[in-house]
Image: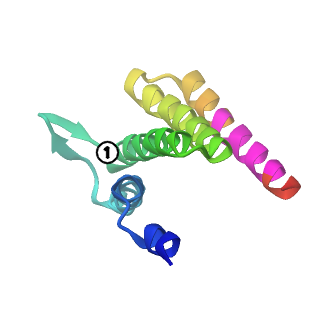
């Protein structure tokens, strides 16, 4: 019974990952509203969405690694790398970095699907 209660306890780190990913989704939905001002600059919601998603994946990688769930941590880490490259591409205006970022995301997704099927 105590192990069951342990699983039901509030998980602040898991909640933080969920909030970041949820924020990313909300920002995608805000895209039709157009750019808004942030620290004196006009920013598109989609760009901030990728920043929130990158942060969520990066935090998830650390959280799952610390819990000993290496496969899930690796999946989150690859997602953070891929989406981080997309953020970098938006920041520097590089189409090449954008395509590399999407290639990492796609490759990571295909790897995750193949590994999940094996398990």
Q: Residue furthest right?
A: 118
Where residue 5 sits, quadrant-wise, is: bottom left
Q: How many marks?
A: 1
Q: Residue at coordinates 68% horizontally, 44% vertically from top-left?
A: 71
Position of the C terminus, as image quadrant, is: bottom right
Q: Nearer the viewer, residue 71 or 93?
A: 71
Q: Secondary structure at mark 1?
A: loop
**Where does the magenta region start and end?**
104-115
Q: Residue at coordinates 28% horizontally, 59% vertically from top-left?
A: 33
Q: Residue furthest bottom?
A: 1
Say if 104 sits above or below 7 in the image. Answer: above
- The residue where tag 1 is placed is 44
- Is 112 part of what is drawn in magenta? yes
Where residue 6 sits, quadrant-wise, is: bottom left
Q: Nearer the viewer, residue 72 or 67?
A: 67
Q: Position of residue 26 (x, y in %)?
A: 35, 62
Q: Residue at coordinates 59% horizontally, 42% vertically from top-left?
A: 73
Say if 32 sits above or below 75 in the image. Answer: below
């Amino acid at each position: 019974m105590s192990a069951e209660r342990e699983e039901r306890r509030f998980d602040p780190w898991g909640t933080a990952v969920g909030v970041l990913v949820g924020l990313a989704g909300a920002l995608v939905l805000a895209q039709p509203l157009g750019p808004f001002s942030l620290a004196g600059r006009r920013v598109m919601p989609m760009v901030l969405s990728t920043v929130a998603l990158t942060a969520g994946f990066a935090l998830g990688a650390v959280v799952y690694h610390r819990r000993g769930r290496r496969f899930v941590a690796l999946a989150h880490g690859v997602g953070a790398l891929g989406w981080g490259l997309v953020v970098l591409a938006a920041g520097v205006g590089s189409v090449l970095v954008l395509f590399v970022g999407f290639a990492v995301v796609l490759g990571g997704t295909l790897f995750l699907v193949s590994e999940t099927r094996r398990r």
